[in-house]
Image (cartoon, helix red, strand yellow):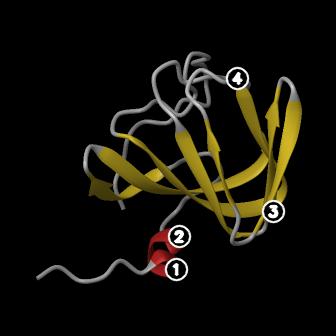
Amino acid sequence: MPDAIRLADKLALLDGPWRPAVIADCNGQEVKVVELEGEFVWHAHSDADELFLVLSGAMRIELRDGVVELREGELYVVPRGVEHRPVAESRCQVLLFEPAALVNTGDAGGPRTAPARRV
């Protein structure tokens, strides 16, 4: 029987902001952890929703028609096709739940595109 996943242990393996790491798989979805700091790129995922759950710190998800503020213990699901930009004024640790092989920069691409990796 596999061991339980300790989020603190997985978060300790992260090597900088905006580099998500897969920690588990669930029905074709990936559970990832990531550290956020600063502004990400505006992007959308045309065929996938994206769940953000704040584990520590605070962040906001900027949408073209508003802003969603998230604190520790709060989550938000960005609906598929909705352009958004995650922003964290200071370091924030987040759990993501999204389809396997989803590209973190969605349709925007660019230098912040992170390769898939497991920790």
Residue type, mark 3 in image: Ala
Judge the density around disc 4: few (<14), some (14-19), many (≥20) Cα neighbours within 10 Å.
some
Q: Which residue is most to the left?
A: 1
Disc 4 vs disc 3: which is toward the camera?
4
Mark 2–mark 3 CB contact (< 8 Å): no
Element type where label 3 sits in the image? strand
Residue appearing at x 60%, y 19% in the figure: 110
Q: Residues within 10 Å of mark 1 (few under 14, many from 20)?
A: few
Judging depth in this view, the residue of 62 and 12 nearest the camera is 62
Q: Secondary structure at mark 4?
A: loop
Left or right: 113 with respect to 36? left
Q: Tell me, for residue 58, which label it has, or none.
A: 3
Question: Which amino acid type corresponds to the residue marked 1 in the rendered image?
Answer: Ala
Residue kind at label 4, given as amino acid type:
Glu
Q: CB of mark 1 within 8 Å of CB of mark 2?
A: yes
- Per the image, the residue denoted by label 1 is 8
Label placed on residue 11:
2
The C terminus lies in which quarter of the figure?
Answer: bottom left
Residue 64 position in % (x across, y down): 83, 23
Counting residues from the start of the chain, the first of labels 4 and 3 encountered is 3
Q: Is residue 45 left or right of residue 66?
A: left
How far apart marks 2 and 4 lie (CA) works out to 27 Å
State the CA–CA distance, disc 1 to disc 4.
30 Å
